[in-house]
Structure formats: C-alpha cells, structure tokens
Image (cartoon, rainbow, N blue to C red):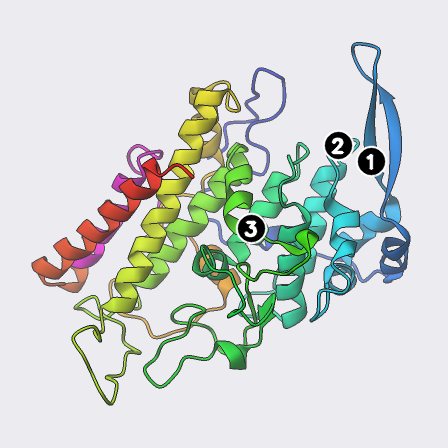
Amino acid sequence: MRDGGSKDESGASLDDNAGDIGRGGRLRSLREHRLSLCAVAFVVLAAGVTIPLVLGGSDGSEEACHQVTASTRALVEDPRAATEALDPGDGLARIGSAQKLLRHNSVCGDGAQALGRIVDAATGSSASGRPHTEAQARAAYAVAAAVHGLELPRGLAPGLARMVAEYVVDAGENRGWGGDQLPGPAVSSEEARPDRQGWSRYGRFLAPGEAHTVFGYTDSRPEAEADIESLVAELSKDPEAFAILYDAERANFAHHLERLTDSGGNPDYRTPSRPDSLSKATNGPDRDLQHVAGHIGSLMKHRTEYAMDGSIPDLAAFDRSVRRHTSGTFRPAEKQLNSRPVMGDIADRPVSGPVEGDLPDGRHQLFSVLEGWAKARGVPARRAAAMKQLMDDAYVRALWLRV
C-alpha cells in the first residue's frame, strides 16, 4: 500500500506509481484514456528524436543532456505510430531508430520517464486479451538492443521493466539462447505453435495468435544485440523496476502452476511415437519451475551485488521502496485451468492478497505458493517434494553464480 509519498535521502519519491493491493492492470494503466492524435511524431523521429542541451553542473562544469521534444512525447498517445517508429523490420534495417530514441546517458527533466512510456506504448498490447503483433515483438527486441550496455538515465528503468514484464514468457525462455538456429528477432504465432508432442521452444501454454520476441537472437551487427540478462541486471538497480520484474516472475509462476495437471505434469504433452525414458509429461514443467526459480534467484543476486558495490547505497531503504512498489502475492487457482492468456495478461493478473513474509526471501515466496497449490490440488507428496527440490537447486545456483 502507498504511504503518502515517502522519499529517499535525495528527496526523490520512493513510491510514485506504487501498486495498490487488489488492483488489476498495472501494465496497462499507462495505456488507458489515450487520445487519438496524429502520427506526425513518426516523421520527426526519423529526423532525430532528441535535442542535445548543455546544462551547468554543480561544480561549474558542463553536462550534456538530451531534451525529448513535444512531438516525440506525442508518441505516448499514439501507440501505432510508436510501434512504427521503433519497429526495426524483419531484417533489422531500421534498428537505428530505437537507438536514436533511447540511447542517451543523460535525459533532461522528465524526458526519461516519457521515453519509458513511449516504449510501453510501442511494445505493449493495448487491451486485455489482445495478443502482441509481430511489429510490437520486433520493437521490443529493438528496445533491448538499443539500451544494451547502457547505464540507464534516471527514470527510464521502470518503463523498460514494464516491457520485460509484458514479454515475461519470451524474456524467460530466451535467456541463454543464441546462434544461427534462431529465426530472427521475432516469430509469428504460427512459427511458435507447439508440435504434435505439445512442445514449443517459445514456451508452454502459449496464447493463439500471439507473436513472440526472440531476445536471444544474435546478429552480426553489434548494435543489434539484445542481451535480456544484462538488461534485467541493469534494471535491478532501480527499486520500482525491481518490483515490476519480481511481480512478473511470481505472477508467471502462479500462471504455470494453475495449468498443470494434479500430478504436476504438462496437460498438452503427447507421448511420442517412439517414447524413451526421457519422454515424460513432467519434463516441461520441471524446466519451467527451474527457470522461474533461477530468474528470481538472479534478481536477489543482483540486489546483493549492488548493495556490496555501492550501487544500492542503502539496502534497507531499497527494500522498503521495492515493497511499496510490489503489488502483492500471486496464488494459482485451486482448480486446473485450460485457458491460454496472452503474455500481457500473465504479468498483469490481479493479486491474491498482500505480500506475506520477507519479500527479499525469494525461496519463501516461491515455496509458500508451491505448497499451497500442491495441498489444494492433492499433488502426490513425492512429486511436490521433487518440484520443490528442483526449484531450490535452481534458485541457489542462480543466487551464487557469478558470470
């Protein structure tokens, strides 16, 4: 719950846009009540979206920043134009457009927040139940590539975190991928469709008609590299962005659990014509559990490392801010669901209640949900214990792994 505007030592608000318990639609709240404006901003973007300014620093030196123009800000109210502006195309020929928009070390005033809202407009589905288009998926890739290796200007991280949350399945599935076997920066819903055994390299329980971003795709041009892991690491310095990512992973966990069978298996699994000992209905779910636990373990690792190197100067204040920005607890339905929601709806699901226990204790947050699900669904004790152990191993491995 919000506490009326607590501030950190610098005087900046720690809980702006904090999530209220029980509300639905955090990721789409910034897309509501849009005006129907003209797409003139797209033309402006092609010519250059920002104007460099020189401001006087406190020590008398000059600091360059970029002023986001009014015409560029208009993209927030015109999602279609925003998508067109950031879409790099199938061959990434226009990958430079996203760099012109986003790749700045310093942005004047509230320009970084405005850029984050433009990213949200360009890459996010505009309404509940609406799948991402290929253009939106490619735009998400272009955004990740544009900020690769950049120390983000203050205010941009929450907007980028909302994008990662909007593509929570793709951001999770694509980690560690790379090489020539990937088709491109995005794939159509037909390309992502599961095979006869119910398997798709792009995730489980995919919504029909939705395109997917392939964040692990590699291109020969260095400016076209979208490293989702390094982006998540950079975003983790910001408490609001950290909370958005943590919420998305826990929401995705609940989403997966409520679609598994009562024995913790994949309901879409089909026995292959030539089965072997490795072909099991639990293989896919086990992999998903390990991924979710690993992602949350990585978030906690970044938190610890940033506290140690001074990037997070006050860990207690950081944790308080994260909690204020955290929506709550996500628990799966008590009965198996067969719906296949779009990615934007996964991270945008309503909370089940307030946060319980120590929020930075990722294992506790995961295990309490897992144990409640197993009890409600009557999952065999042996299977539930195996699932918990898999998650524990993945969480600890990610928490301590140094790259």
Q: Is residue 291 above or below residue 398?
A: below
- Please tell me the numbered disc located at residue 66: 1
The front one of 278 and 385 is: 278
Q: Are marks 1 and 2 in contact (CB under 8 Å)?
A: yes
Quarter of the rendering containing residue 204: bottom left
Q: Is residue 6 above or below residue 338?
A: above
Q: Which residues are magenta?
A: 352-375
**Of the residues under marks 1 and 2, which one precedes in the sequence?**
1
**Cα–Cα span, label 3 and label 2:** 21 Å
Q: Are marks 3 and 2 in contact (CB under 8 Å)?
A: no
Q: Quadrant of the C terminus?
A: top left
Which residue is denoted by mark 2 in the rendering? 106
As drawn, is 140 to the left or to the right of 351?
A: right
- Answer whether residue 263 is magenta in the image: no
The three-letter code of the residue at mark 3 reads Asp
Say which residue appears at 8% left-offset and 59% top-offset: 382
Which residue is denoted by mark 3 in the rendering? 227
